[in-house]
């Protein structure tokens, strides 16, 4: 009986500490990108545009509303991630770690007119 009680108590402590660890984990911050239907592109956080973000992990959901556009996220002198491609319409979600530096989002075929920038601090 004592062994059973001890085992049950041990399992309860492990379960509580595992739950506390899971609760302490940080979640990815949501960003929303939109490209099209016209010649527009934007990236927002909680419905508002931004110029700076803290470094961290972000869940980026892009709504691509025109097959003639795509959505690319690029770090100056660094990583480039094509989130949606030309020919695709619909929604895609990616999770990315954004590191310190200047970032640009743009539509590759219309890069000179459809772009935005922000800084990660």
Image (tube, helix red, strand yellow):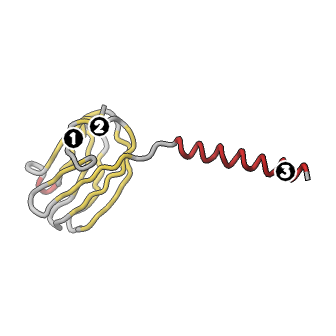
> Are the residues at dot 2 and dot 1 in contact (C-beta closer than 8 Å)?
yes
Quick one: 81 or 57, which is closer to the camera?
A: 57
Residue 35 pos. (x, y %):
18, 58
Image side of residue 27 versus residue 114, left or right? right
Image side of residue 59 versus residue 42, left or right? right
| Crowd rating for badge 2 (residues with CA inside 10 Å; few <14, some 14–19, many 20+) | some
* Residue found 21% across the figure and 40% down from its top: 50
* Residue found 40% across the figure and 47% down from its top: 28
Q: How many marks?
A: 3
Q: Secondary structure at mark 3?
A: helix
Mark 2 against mark 3, which lies toward the viewer?
3
Question: Residue 113: which disc?
Answer: none
**Which residue corresponds to mark 1?**
50
Q: CA distance from mark 3 to mark 1?
A: 55 Å
Residue 36 pos. (x, y %):
14, 61
Q: Secondary structure at mark 1?
A: loop
Quick one: 118 or 19, which is closer to the camera?
A: 19
* Residue found 31% across the figure and 43% down from its top: 79
Q: CA distance from mark 2 to mark 1?
A: 8 Å
**Which residue corresponds to mark 2?**
53
**Which residue corresponds to mark 3?**
5
Mark 3 against mark 1, which lies toward the viewer?
3
Up the image or down, 121 lies above or below 114; here it is above
Quick one: 44 or 62, which is closer to the camera?
A: 44
Up the image or down, 63 lies above or below 49; here it is below
Residue 62 pos. (x, y %):
27, 58
Q: Which of marks 3 and 2 precedes in the sequence?
A: 3
């Amino acid at each position: 009986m004592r062994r059973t009680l001890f085992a049950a108590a041990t399992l309860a402590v492990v379960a509580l500490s595992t739950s506390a660890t899971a609760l302490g984990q940080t979640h990815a911050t949501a960003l929303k990108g939109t490209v099209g239907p016209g010649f527009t592109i934007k990236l927002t956080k909680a419905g508002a545009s931004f110029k700076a973000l803290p470094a961290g992990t972000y869940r980026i959901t892009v709504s691509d509303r025109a097959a003639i556009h795509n959505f690319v996220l690029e770090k100056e002198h660094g990583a480039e991630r094509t989130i949606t491609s030309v020919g695709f319409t619909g929604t895609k979600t990616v999770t990315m770690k954004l590191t310190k530096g200047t970032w640009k989002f743009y539509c590759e075929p219309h890069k000179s007119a459809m772009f935005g920038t922000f800084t990660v601090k």
